[in-house]
Amino acid sequence: MELKNKATRFGPREIFNFKLLGTPQMRAFHMSWFAFFLCFFAWFGIAPLMKIVAKEMSLTKSQIGWCIIGSVAITVLARLFIGWLCDRVGPRLAYTWLLLLGSIPVMCIGFAHDFTTFLIFRIAIGAIGASFVITQYHTSVMFAPNCVGTANATSAGWGNLGGGVTQMVMPLVFAGFVTLLGFSESIGWRASMFVAGLMCALTGVAYYLFTQDAPDGNFSELRAKGLLPKKEESKGTFLEAAKDYRVWALFIIYGTCFGIELTINNVATLYFLNHFDYFQEMDSVKALSIAGLIAGSFGLMNLFARTMGGHFGDRFGAKWGLSGRVKWLFVVLFCEGLALMLFSQMSVLLLAIPALILFSLFVQMSEGATFSVVPFINKRALGSVSGIVGAGGNAGAVAAGFLFKAESLSWPTALFILGSIVTCCSFFCFAVNFSEAAETEARLHTDAVGVGLSGPLELEPAPATS
């Protein structure tokens, strides 16, 4: 069986047409990207404040490295689980519970008083990063193959904006608590994180109230009507996905793009503060705010860059089939590696900033290009495929974290090594191939509905069920 009535149009006219908020497809899009945005904001909210935390708790370089690793390690397991859970209970309930439960450690990190307790809370917060899988799952079941790459890329890209916005906003929130309300620096960073956690909890309630699992209703309703396989029939989807070597190729690929983005989100503010003389003579609050603004430019590229990756994936797919999507992925991933090596060699701030933005462009286009391919790997096990590939992003961030933890490596050297690894791993793209039957199916669908970014929201014709 396949879900019916997916939207076949997605673009600016649909995104900014508030009348379409009455459709389940566009409600799911807007709620999923906003929920992911807040999760990302809370996930990395502490990163731009690490200079203050490290000073208060006397953290060493090695301990900061463990915090970087811990923040992304648990997400590997969380994403594997949440993908399977989406296949079972649907994205609506999965997102609701993740937001509500994930908000607890975000708010409670304020109780940390030493390295051990801080690391425990930092690890627990990482589970909220599984939100990405639900976001991609929800848009994948709401939008048809001709525009799913663009829809996936835009929802994830706008969600990833949280990583850039938090670099800019959290230092300002912290400064507000300290300078305007007279809090100490120790209380200021704790209060900032409590605000982020509270916003996640409120969004969890809203997600439950305003979304549904699929275009025609929630999974429980569709199963009761016989329009969706029973829960018991979805038990084997994870193993089915795990046996496909293409899934693991994409696991590695996503580790070298999203994993790199997570790493940069964790280290960017500290990197600029510690490696550029411009910040050395400033007071801590001012230096933190300016470095946060610069670091935030990396994440702000998600406003359009990831959408570009998915959109061109759809365009390449329309012209050259599924193999065209894969070739586009190779091009942007290869360029990402080169751009990262270039950024690592910048020692002058005025040159480092444009190099960072160029690097960010290719990172996020690579992410969008990856998830323009994922929905075509195995539709029956979409949640499990998304979960495994999404977990690859965090596995890549964990591996990268060990480079920044090493006492013998400077951070610029670690970034250069990462760039070399990304360039080499781009060749894994050629392991992702499709059968002629899959190519034909995708081509027939594209010929039937076309690829467009404007026009009214249309619904995919209902396919025959089996």
Image (cartoon, grey):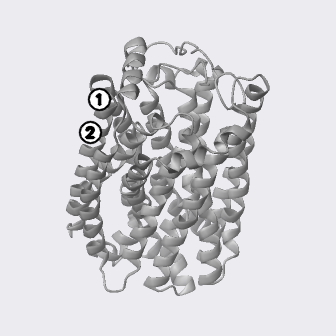
| 273 to the left or right of 16 | left
Q: Residue at x 29, y 48 (%)?
A: 362
Closer-to-camera residue (195/200): 200
Q: Which residue is mark 1?
A: 316
User: Depth check: 308 or 17 in front?
Assistant: 308
| Tag 2 secondary structure | helix
Measured as percent of width and height from the top left, residue 328 is found at 27, 38
Count how many numbered circles sit on residues in the image. Answer: 2
> Mark 1 is on which residue type?
Phe
Q: Position of residue 22 (x, y in %)?
A: 65, 20
Q: Residue at x 63, y 54 (%)?
A: 81
What kind of residue is marked 2? Lys
Indicate the quadrant where residue 186 lies: bottom right
Badge 2 is on which residue? 327
Residue 290, compared with residue 92, is above or below; it is below
Q: Secondary structure at mark 1?
A: helix
In the picture provided, is 32 more to the left or to the right than 203?
A: left
**Image x and y of residue 383, in percent:** 58, 42
In the rendered image, the vertical position of residue 450 relative to residue 220, given as above or below: above
Task: Pick whichever of labels 2 and 1 is earlier in the sequence.
Answer: 1
Which residue lies at the image location 30% right of the left edge and 66% below the top edge? 418
Res 33 seen here: no
Q: Front-most of 109 and 280?
A: 109
